[in-house]
Image: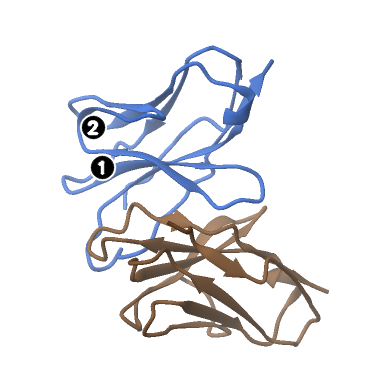
């Protein structure tokens, strides 16, 4: 499983766009990039997943450059309720990894009014 | 559709006791994973079950065990509790048993060992 590196914390203000970058230099061909969000005392919530280029859903966008060694989660116009920890995960679902998510330290995003 | 439910939500136990936590996955989801979350170690994978079989296991001692029933509900058991077992225990279910990176987590069970 590829190791990921992301900033420990970020601050933003309401209404701004927030970009959180994750580095994964050792990403393998079969690996997908997945982002989760976690609020205090709650379970993580799946946000978005991608393999290459750009993926967008109602919550966020995920940008993946051609070399796939990094990815950027983009949250448009954040609000106070977006204050949470964001985790970047990289891996495949081969037989040794079935059902297993490996969470790093994540990025604590603090949105200020 | 109801989400993943976990019972109980809070639990206080004494060292040496054992505890059983329950998880009901989203209807139709047959893969269930368990995680332990602590401030020091973060989120760590315990094990995963599919069709009543444990398919994957994390690096935890044998005091931690689990099982899955035919209706996909799952339980995990911790025997001979230690103070360090105090944590938030999270259960997650997945629809596609062959691609489980999209998991849906329950609210967790907060276990305190005194």
Q: Secondary structure at mark 2?
A: loop
Query: Could you tell me which residue is drawn at 74 percent across and 87 percent down?
Result: B17
For marks 1 and 2 on the same chain, the one whose residue lies earlier in the sequence: 1
Q: Which mark is residue A27?
A: 1
Camera-side residue: B30 or A109? B30
Write down the quadrant of residue A107 in the picture.
Answer: top right
Chain of the residue on which disc 1 is drawn: A
Chain of the residue on which disc 2 is drawn: A
> Percent x, y for residue B71?
39, 80
Q: Secondary structure at mark 1?
A: loop
Other residues around mark 2 within 10 Å, as few (<14) / some (14–19) / many (≥20): many
Query: Could you tell me which residue is drawn at 47 percent across and 33 percent down?
Result: A6
Q: Which mark is residue A68?
A: 2
Write down which chain is painted brown. Answer: B
Query: In the image, B25: left or right of A84?
Result: left
Query: Could you tell me which residue is drawn at 31 percent across and 61 percent down?
Result: B95
> Percent x, y for residue B60?
52, 74
> Does residue A71 sit above or below B51 in this rendering?
above
> Does residue B5 sit above or below A40 in this rendering?
below
Q: Are marks 1 and 2 in contact (CB under 8 Å)?
A: yes
Q: Which mark is residue B91?
A: none
State the hue of chain A.
Answer: blue
Query: In the image, A43: left or right of A89?
Result: right
> Percent x, y for residue A17?
48, 15
Other residues around mark 1 within 10 Å, as few (<14) / some (14–19) / many (≥20): many
């Amino acid at each position: 499983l590829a190791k990921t590196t992301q900033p420990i914390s970020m601050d933003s203000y309401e209404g701004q766009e927030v970009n959180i970058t994750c580095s994964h230099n050792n990403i393998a061909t079969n690996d997908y990039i997945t982002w989760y969000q976690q609020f205090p005392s709650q379970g993580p919530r799946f946000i978005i997943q991608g393999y290459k280029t750009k993926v967008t859903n109602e919550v966020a966008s995920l940008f993946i450059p051609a070399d796939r060694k990094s990815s950027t989660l983009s949250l448009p116009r954040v609000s106070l309720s977006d204050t949470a920890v964001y985790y970047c995960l990289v891996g495949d679902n081969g037989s040794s990894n079935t059902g297993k998510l490996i969470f790093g330290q994540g990025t604590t995003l603090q949105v200020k009014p | 559709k109801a989400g993943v439910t976990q019972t109980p939500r809070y639990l206080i136990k004494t060292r040496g006791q054992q505890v059983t936590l329950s998880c009901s996955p989203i209807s139709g989801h047959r893969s269930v994973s368990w995680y332990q979350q602590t401030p020091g170690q973060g989120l760590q994978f315990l094990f995963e079950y599919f069709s009543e079989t444990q398919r994957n296991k994390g690096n935890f001692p044998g005091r931690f065990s689990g099982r899955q029933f035919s209706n996909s509900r799952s339980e995990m058991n911790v025997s001979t509790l230690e103070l360090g077992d105090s944590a938030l225990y999270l259960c997650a279910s997945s629809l596609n048993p062959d691609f489980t990176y999209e998991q849906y987590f329950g609210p967790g069970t907060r276990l305190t060992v005194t």
